[in-house]
Image: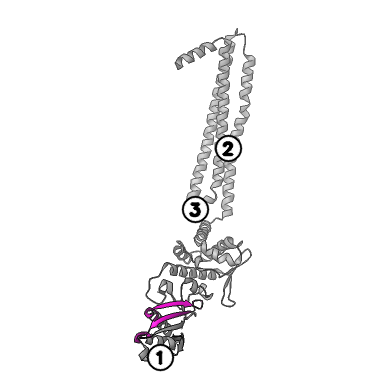
Amino acid sequence: MQNHKKLLDSILDFIAKCKSIDWIDNNNQIECKIIFDQKSFELLQVIEDEGAVNKIIKDGTAFLIKNIISSELKKDEFIVLIHLPKSEKLYFAKDIKDLLYSKINRYHTPSIYYVYSESYGNILENKVTKKIQDYCSTINIIELIFSISDHVDKTGPERTSIFLCKHKLEIPIDYEAENLVHSQLYTTFIKNFDSEPHIEQKIIILKNTIYDFVCNIPSKERLKNILDNFDFIIERYNDNYQLFISDISTETLTLELEAKKLEYVEKIHKIISDIQNKILTIPAALLILFTQFNHSGNEIIKNSGLLLTNLIFIIFIHLMLNNQEKALQSIIESVSSKKSFYRKKYGSIFSNFKEIFNSIEERYINQNKIISIIRFIAYSSFWTSIIYFLHIYDKLNWLIKIFISQLK
């Protein structure tokens, strides 16, 4: 460990003294242009001791470090090719993409690593950048996936997480730099996930949540989708866990709400059925009234009695409709109360079931419209009988004149 840290420090100090550097050989080497001073020459000797110096070139001629004489220092420009360490013990990367070029680094951080573009080394006192933080979070998530897996295929340098849920599900550890997790919920999630109670149940819930999310996605794309949508997966997990700690499943809750819906719908339909039995009495009463009227106008007492009877009938219809409206109102108030209760009890998952309550409220609105139509028909029949009564006794024109004068 100490030798690796010394090598990393020497490479960084040496780069700082170079006039320029170029990344070559798929970022496995750097080409440094430098005019040596005593310090940079000593640093190069340390790097050489660790076998990391590939070539030293001056004027197109390759040199061994031992052949460089002190008279050439501070005078001539050299090109030094340094073979960068890229192992599990020490990994020197140009950027995050280069760090992830190693398949091992996609699920396990090297003991010592340095990312040049981020000016960050894990054993140095550097400020952690956003990309480094995302990389560490991603590694932690992959370690979490390994920990809840039923099996991890460790053939070769690659890893594949295997879930045995409804069916066997393979999640190869394959992703790119752009898939690094930018999670806002990760820290809180990990803290709650690793704590008591219900740790075993949490593992099962998380496995099933991940399985449901990626089971229909090609295996090579599964981990990328998990990382890209990790906050959404956490929300789904939290919803499912909320159901678990409430001692209820989604299916059970759905059945319970559907039963409530059926109960309310039956009550609403019973009210309308009661009204429908009386709807036919309105035109029937109007027909009887017209057939019993003395159209010659000779029996005003009889006609007035029939008109009064029609008025009493309409009053009864009015009272009945008021009672039915109140009954509907009490039902919808009960529905609203239940809706508030379930929203408070189940929180964010309530949105999955609110359509059940919405359908009841729609039925209430429709039945209210039916009552309004019946009321309009009843009132219209009454006013029709009055107009006809006035017509028999030649009072209609008189009434119209009074109405017009009032408007003026």
Q: Which quarter of the image is occupied by the C terminus? A: top left
Start-end of magenta stretch? 13-40
Residue type, mark 3 in image = Ser
Residue 65 in sight in this render: yes
Residue type, mark 1 in image = Ile
Q: Which quarter of the image is occupied by the N terminus? A: bottom left
Q: Alpha-carbon neighbours of circle 2 within 10 Å: few (<14), some, or many (≥20)? A: many
- Residue under label 1, please give it: 68
Q: Secondary structure at mark 2?
A: helix
- Residue under label 2, please give it: 268
Residue 18 counted in the magenta span: yes
Mark closer to the observer (1, 3): 1
The residue at the point 52 percent across, 74 percent down is 101
Q: CA distance from mark 2 to mark 1?
A: 99 Å
Residue type, mark 2 in image = Ile
- Residue under label 3, please give it: 348
Q: Residue furthest front?
A: 59
Is tag 1's residue or tag 3's residue first in the polypeptide sequence?
1
Which of 183/126 is in front? 126
Residue 318, image x and y in percent? 54, 26
